Amino acid sequence: MSIAIRNISKEFGTFKALNDVSLDIESGELVALLGPSGCGKTTLLRIIAGLETADQGNILFSGEDTTDVHVRERNVGFVFQHYALFRHMSVFDNVAFGLRMKPRAVRPSEAVIKQKVHELLALVQLDWLADRFPAQLSGGQRQRIALARALAVEPKVLLLDEPFGALDATVRKELRRWLRRLHDDLHVTSIFVTHDQEEALEVADRVVLMNSGKVEQVGSPQQVWDHPASPFVYGFLGDVNLFHGRAHEGEMLIGEDHRGVRLDSPEHSSAQDAKAFAYVRPHDLEVTRYVASENNGANGQRGIPAKLVRAIVVGPIARLELLPLDASAAGSGDIIEAQISAQQFTEMALKEGEALALTPRKARVFVAH
């Protein structure tokens, strides 16, 4: 089932939770709504479900307006962060609940319900736990049972609100892979809310980045990672360094003219000495020793000078934390993060306290308006 979200707005008192949001979700797609707390992603999910009413706008399921259709009639499966399993019911009865609550005319027989519940428990790989109670299960098992219960009524749309938020990192990773495989088997149109960019990028077909009640960018995980549409998206997706400078006729200068770094930014060819920002990921910084000299101008060393304050070497990667020596290049006191291979770190024999030169291999420049 495809979902069309048209011009949805929602206010809670003076707080604007959603501001004219429009979005199309294809049938069978798994879409992540990603953003910080308070950006409107859960409100949008609840409006799609029918648990919340929009102040304006429409929700269409496969072209049919469902804006005023009651939540019970929408045929939506919902999975919350905190499982919401009935503690007094066995796993089997929890999964069977939705089927047993159907109106008599369309309710399956108990024999059909039994078969279906065992099929679903097999699907979530927990058929051996049918007689247990929620308190006897681990968090990851409870969340899979919650998912089986949501799938029991054969929803046309599956909505998941921070489904793995309450679980530890190892279980989260395992369940992410499992959810992706399950979705590939079932192809039910699914939307899940998360504030964890790794989760969104790993699981979703498409990612919808939200900020302050608006959609900032929609695209495949690769698209939003490689081509962030705004400073917010760049800053939200993974670690990033922010450098300040001036953009002029297709170039940006970071640092002092005679020893700074010039970045090509042809997209800003019309800029005339404008304030600009460059976003650079830690692994896109080239690290060399800084050699101060009188002639660092015409043919001397260029680079953003920074002092190495801490090095963390874990496995094949060395993470360097550096303090810019030129406060105008990065925010005063802002730590710059660079990543190099542990091998390069060892070969260079870097020591904390020494001066290094940083040169961006790849950067994204935005001009202040």
Image (spheres, rainbow, N blue to C red):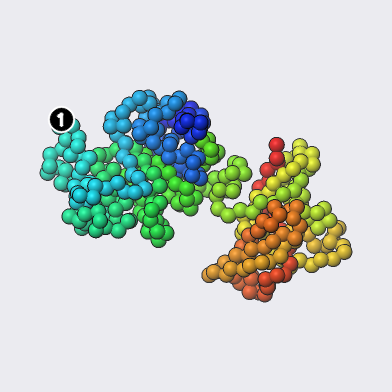
> Can you say which quadrant of the picture contains the C terminus?
top right
Residue drawn at x 85%, y 58% is: 297
**Quadrant in the picture for residue 345:** bottom right
Residue drawn at x 62%, y 58% is: 282
Kindly identify the amino acid type of the residue bearing the numbered disc 1.
Answer: Ala
**56 or 265, which is in the foreground?**
56
Residue drawn at x 64%, y 54% is: 241
**Residue 268 x %, y %:** 72, 40
| Vertical order, 78 against 311 (above or below) | above
**276 or 212, which is in the foreground?**
212
**Residue 266 x %, y %:** 72, 43
**Residue 1 x %, y %:** 35, 34
Which residue sits furthest right? Answer: 294
Which residue sits furthest front? Answer: 13
**Residue 226 x %, y %:** 58, 48
Asked whether, in this view, residue 120 is left or right of residue 80, the answer is left
Q: Secondary structure at mark 1?
A: helix
Asked whether, in this view, residue 316 is left or right of residue 110, the answer is right
Residue drawn at x 29%, y 34% is: 75
Q: Is residue 128 visible?
A: yes
Residue identifier under label 1 = 105
**Quadrant in the picture for residue 261:** bottom right
**88 or 348, which is in the foreground?**
88
Asked whether, in this view, residue 301 is left or right of residue 4, the answer is right
**Quadrant in the picture for residue 367:** top right
**196 or 153, which is in the foreground?**
196
